[in-house]
Image (cartoon, helix red, strand yellow):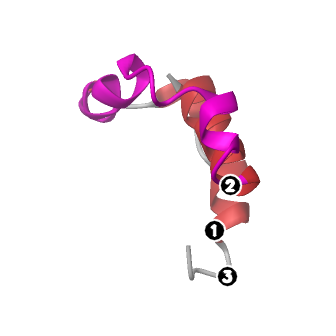
Amino acid sequence: MGDVDFLKKLQMYDKDNVPDSILNKLKPYIESPKFDPEKVAAQSKVAKSLCVWVRAID
């Protein structure tokens, strides 16, 4: 998160070619009831945005 180009990297991420290995690593998070954007938003609006982005990638 300290990377000054972090947002740019997210915007440029090739969402149409995500390797299965990455999707498999995301699976436990996506399936967790705690990884719900509204629940995450209670802690941080930035984290909510990242949660939504991760779900969109999946």
Which amino acid, mark 2? Ser
Magenta region: 21-44
Residue 14 or residue 30, whichever sits in front:
30
Badge 3: residue crowd in 10 Å (few <14, some 14–19, many ≥20): few
Instruction: Name the residue rendered at 63%, 46% in the picture.
Output: 50
Whether residue 12 is situated above or below residue 54 in the rendered picture? below
Residue 25 or residue 29, whichever sits in front:
29
* Residue at the spot of label 1: 6
Q: Tell me if label 3 and label 2 are in contact, CB under 8 Å.
A: no
Which amino acid, mark 3? Val
Q: Which of the 4 image quadrants contains residue 42?
A: top right
Badge 1: residue crowd in 10 Å (few <14, some 14–19, many ≥20): few
Q: Tell me if label 1 and label 2 are in contact, CB under 8 Å.
A: no
Q: Residue 16: x percent and y percent?
A: 57, 25
Q: Who comes first in sequence, dot 3 or dot 2?
A: 3
Residue 10 or residue 26, whichever sits in front:
26
Pair 1/2: label in front:
2
Instruction: Name the residue rendered at 37%, 17% in the picture.
Output: 31
Judged left or right of residue 33, residue 1 is right
Pair 3/2: label in front:
2
* Residue at the spot of label 3: 4
Check residue 12 for magenta coloring. no
Whether residue 13 is situated above or below residue 37 in the rendered picture? below
What is the spatial separation of the Cα atoms under label 3 and label 1, in whole angstroms?
6 Å
* Residue at the spot of label 2: 44
Whether residue 36 is situated above or below residue 51 in the rendered picture? above
